[in-house]
Image (cartoon, grey):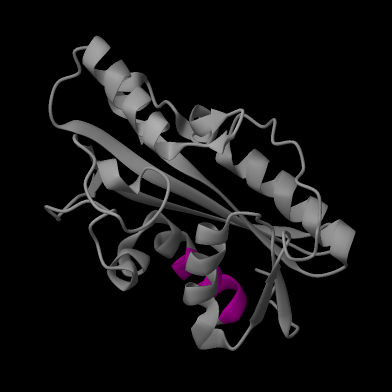
Amino acid sequence: MTRRFSGERLLIATHNAGKLEEIADLLRPFSVAVVSAGELGLPEPIEDGTTFVENARTKAHAAAKASGLIALSDDSGIEIDALDGAPGVYTADWAETPQGRDFTMAMSRTHDKLEAANAPHPRTARFCCTLVMAWPDGHDEVFPGVMPGQVVWPMRGEQGHGYDPIFMPDGYNITFGEMDRMEKNRISHRADAFRKLVAGCFA
């Protein structure tokens, strides 16, 4: 039996403004007030897991323990078949620079690796998302989501964040970077995970 959410405020265990905005949009119908780990000044835990669920659990439990609130975390990334599933859990790491994250550089790096591997087209890929809701007593619930598609080049669109400008979801001829935010939030990997979260903890 899935444990249901109770309370008026949910802590989103992220310091990523784009991710917070997306999650807040998805939670709006449930009249839940959201606050982020960044807003509360909570430290970012070290994400040393090798799977999305390990990293999501690390973030959710650290935030719940530090705040005393029920915490929701998301670990997500893009898996590219021709790169043996990379970057996967290291999606954000590929964007790291001494000056902060540079996703334009990360997308260029991804394209260079695909070209070096002479990867055939379509370059199939999927965005993956694992949501973990953790309670201060140590309990958690896990909800995975996925959006299949392909990696395209050159980058297209100014919407979204991360690798969105090079990811074209199945059934569409535009990238996440070109897609209206509301449409993306309706079909994305995060939306898939959210439908499961809502059915389990809110419905």
Image position of 68 (left or right of 90): right
Name the foreground residue: 141 vs 132.
132
Per the image, is 79 magenta?
Answer: no
> Residue 135: x percent and y percent?
79, 64
Tell me which residue sits at (41%, 61%) in the image. Answer: 192
**Numbered range of the magenta stretch:** 194-202
In the picture shown, does residue 203 fall above or below 92?
Answer: below
> Residue 140: x percent and y percent?
73, 58
> Residue 139: x percent and y percent?
79, 59
Looking at the rendered image, the quarter that the N terminus falls into is bottom right
> Residue 188: x percent and y percent?
35, 59
Tell me which residue sits at (57%, 40%) in the image. Answer: 52
Specify whether residue 137 is in view.
no
Residue, far front? 99
Per the image, is 198 magenta?
Answer: yes
In the picture shown, does residue 8 fall above or below 104?
Answer: below
Image position of 152 (left or right of 125): left
Most frequent secondary structure within the magenta stretch: helix
Image position of 27 (left or right of 15): left
In the picture shown, does residue 51 fall above or below 18?
Answer: above
Tell me which residue sits at (47%, 32%) in the image. Answer: 88
